[in-house]
Amino acid sequence: MEPTWKPIEHTEQTQPVASFPDRREWIAAILGIAPFFLNLSSTTTTSSNGRITSFQQIDYVDILFGALCIIVILTTIRLWSRTRPQDLMKRRIVFVALLALGAFQIASGLGIFTRI
């Protein structure tokens, strides 16, 4: 006599394909570009005998939006396994570009590129 139940067949489950560009990539791009248009900075200058001895500039928008850009773009790493092969290299290029943009904004906000 044959059993009335059938064993579960294990088939490979396919995950839905992630679209390119993803919503998070657009959000990261906006966060990375926004500090070029927004500004909330603080500058401190110290002078002695009419000469500038120290100068410090901090832009809080650059630091905040750059950090948010990096955090959002890091969440897209998990999309790589669901990306079509023809879009995977594009997604990785966008990832590196937005990661570099976020790092640039943080460095800019800390005044690393400021000259006296």
Image (tube, helix red, strand yellow):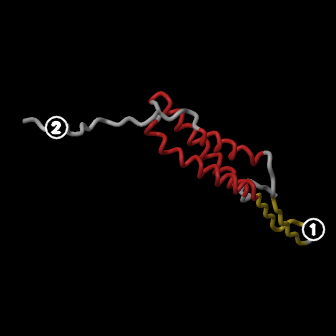
Q: Earlier in the sequence, mark 1 or mark 2?
A: 2
What is the quadrant of the C terminus in the image? bottom right
Q: Which residue type carries mark 2?
A: Thr
Task: Tell me the quadrant of the picture where the N terminus can be found.
Answer: top left
Q: Is residue 48 left or right of residue 84?
A: right
The residue most toward the top is: 86
Say what secondary structure mark 1 lies in: loop
For mark 1, what is the residue?
A: 50
Vertical position of residue 9 compared to residue 43: above or below: above
**Residue depth check, mark 1 versus mark 2: number of the one nearer the observer:** 2
The residue under label 1 is which amino acid type? Gly
Residue 83 x, y percent position in the rendering: 47, 34
Query: Dot 2, how many residues are within 10 Å of its Cα: few (below 14), some (14-19), or many (20+)?
Result: few
Q: Depth check: 104 or 72 in front?
A: 72
Q: Which of the 4 image quadrants contains residue 85?
A: top left
Q: Residue furthest bottom?
A: 48
Q: Residue at x 74, y 45 (%)?
A: 34
Mark 1 residue crowding within 10 angstroms, few (<14) / some (14–19) / many (20+): few
Query: Where in the figure is residue 96, as x and y percent of width and height?
Result: 56, 42
Question: Of residues 11 and 114, which is closer to you in this image?
Answer: 11
Q: Position of residue 113 (x, y in %)?
A: 73, 53
The relative height of residue 72 versus residue 86 in the rendered view (above or below) is: below
Q: Which mark is residue 4?
A: 2
Left or right side of 95 for 1: left
Q: Residue 95 vs residue 49: left or right?
A: left
Q: Is residue 96 above or below residue 48?
A: above
Mark 1 touches mark 2? (CB < 8 Å)? no
Q: Please, what secondary structure does the residue beneath circle 2 have?
A: loop
Percent coordinates x, y for residue 46 in the rendering: 85, 69
Q: Residue at x 24, y 39 (%)?
A: 8
Q: How many marks?
A: 2
Question: What is the C-alpha distance between the residues marked 1 and 2?
Answer: 96 Å
